[in-house]
Image (tube, rainbow, N blue to C red):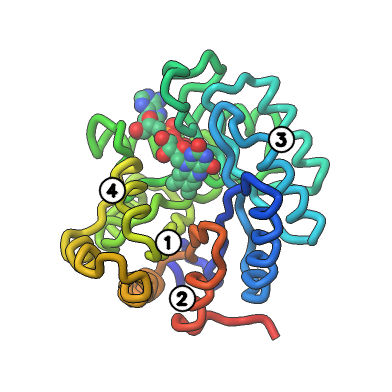
């Protein structure tokens, strides 16, 4: 049994929309490889304020044309209700019913809300439920190490509860490398009576400089012992990848053994690191 009470863990892969035609060609090859693992769905990120709008649409449309279950991310900050309604209607026309509903982060200089209708993800979830009823399966973000702008852990949990009560079906977490924070979040949610699957977000470790930059920005902690080991490898990319693989494999093992209801891999549009984890976790591959 998983923490959500289901016996079937859900595995999903996250992509970002490529900036170039070459990037799109490469993405198609990587998706074809990942698809052999039989994930439940692929998700595709969306830049707040519509900054990746057309590229996200293009990627999502291609995925749907391949018959792949697709969950577009939708970041509401900087958008108005009419725009959000239009985007979701367009997705429903393509047979898409699963969305990752987010606030997003506006690029600096666009103000706090960018003059949009929505300030927080709970407002987006409530709007989508009001407009589209139960036609949508809504995933929201959760933060085992807390969102960097939250004034306190308690306030962040209260905000998460608001999103769930607004109508979220499931949550995907920010990535982390210490499973204790994840299990503490799941326990806290159970205590608050929040009954939804909280799927850990898994970031493979392949490039230390990039990972350190991301982590500083999003508030995900790289434990000191991992940081120090990674720093020690310098430019030795193969050593970073080998060590990173063992760290993330152990993390995934512990999460699944502890009842996590699935894993959501931040693939960074690269199939190999996720495929190696899948293989070493001995996850099933369709015949
Ligand atoms: P919210 O849930 O609205 O929370 C944002 C902050 O506001 C938190 O500190 C929260 O505690 C606080 N808060 C919430 N409600 C209230 C309230 N009513 N009053 C006061 N404070 C409140 N970003 C993108 O731009 N595009 C993506 O595609 C994308 N995909 C993501 C996928 C996942 C799985 C995750 C975990 C994150 C993703 N992000 C993405 C990043 C995310 O948009 C940022 O972390 C953003 O800062 C918060 O988004 P949210 O939906 O969690 O916001």
Camera-side residue of 17 and 3: 17
Crowd class of label 1 (few under 14; some 14 to 19; many from 20; radius 10 Å): many
Residue drawn at x 33%, y 47% as measured from the top left: 213
Query: Is the residue indicated by label 2 positioned so its CB lies within 8 Å of ligand 1?
Result: no
Answer with mark 1 or mark 4, whichever residue precedes in sequence.
4
Instruction: Please tell me whether residue 73 is drawn above or below residue 104 in the rendered image.
Output: below
Q: Name the residue under label 3.
A: 88
Instruction: For the residues labelled 2 and 1, say whether their Cβ atoms are less than 8 Å apart.
Output: yes
148 horizontally vs 164: left or right: left
Position of the C terminus by quadrant: bottom right
Instruction: For the residues labelled 2 and 3, say whether their Cβ atoms are less than 8 Å apart.
Output: no
Instruction: Please tell me whether residue 216 is drawn above or below residue 124 in the rendered image.
Output: below
Q: Name the residue under label 4.
A: 145
Q: Name the residue under label 2.
A: 277
Camera-side mark, 1 or 3 = 1
Say which mark, if any, is on residue 42: none
Residue drawn at x 52%, y 34% as measured from the top left: 166
Element at label 3: helix
Element at label 1: strand
Crowd class of label 4 (few under 14; some 14 to 19; many from 20; radius 10 Å): many
Residue 99 percent coordinates (x, y): 62, 44
- Residue 248 visible in the picture: no
Q: Mark 1 points at which residue?
A: 202
Residue 170 percent coordinates (x, y): 52, 50
Whole-Å distance between the Cαs marked 1 and 3?
A: 27 Å
Residue drawn at x 41%, y 60% as measured from the top left: 203
Whole-Å distance between the Cαs marked 2 and 3?
A: 33 Å
Whole-Å distance between the Cαs marked 4 and 2?
A: 23 Å
Camera-side mark, 1 or 4 = 1
- How many dots with numbers? 4
Residue 95 percent coordinates (x, y): 79, 48
Camera-side residue of 202 and 2: 202
């Amino acid at each position: 049994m998983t923490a959500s009470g289901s016996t079937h863990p859900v595995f999903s892969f996250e992509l970002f929309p490529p900036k170039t035609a070459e990037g799109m060609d490469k993405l198609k090859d990587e998706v074809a490889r990942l698809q052999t693992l039989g994930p439940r769905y692929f998700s595709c990120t969306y830049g707040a304020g519509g900054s990746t709008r057309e590229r996200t649409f293009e990627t999502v449309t291609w995925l749907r044309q391949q018959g792949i279950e697709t969950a577009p991310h939708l970041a509401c900050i900087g958008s108005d209700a009419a725009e959000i309604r239009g985007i979701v209607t367009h997705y429903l026309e393509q047979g898409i019913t699963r969305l990752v509903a987010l606030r997003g982060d506006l690029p600096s200089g666009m103000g706090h809300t960018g003059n949009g209708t929505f300030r927080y993800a709970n407002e987006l979830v409530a709007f989508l439920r009001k407009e589209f009823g139960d036609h949508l399966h809504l995933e929201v973000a959760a933060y085992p190490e807390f969102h960097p702008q939250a004034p306190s852990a308690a306030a962040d949990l209260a905000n998460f509860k608001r999103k769930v009560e607004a109508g979220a079906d499931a949550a995907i977490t920010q990535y982390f490398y210490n499973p204790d924070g994840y299990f503490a979040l799941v326990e806290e949610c159970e205590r608050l009576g929040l009954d939804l699957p909280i799927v850990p977000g898994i970031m493979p470790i392949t490039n230390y400089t990039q990972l350190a930059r991301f982590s500083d920005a999003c508030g995900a902690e790289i434990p000191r012992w991992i940081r120090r080991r990674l720093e020690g490898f310098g430019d030795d990319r193969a050593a970073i990848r080998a060590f990173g693989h063992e760290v993330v494999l152990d993390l995934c093992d512990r999460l699944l053994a502890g009842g996590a209801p699935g894993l959501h891999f931040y693939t960074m549009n690269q199939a190999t690191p996720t495929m190696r984890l899948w293989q070493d976790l001995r996850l099933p591959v369709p015949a």
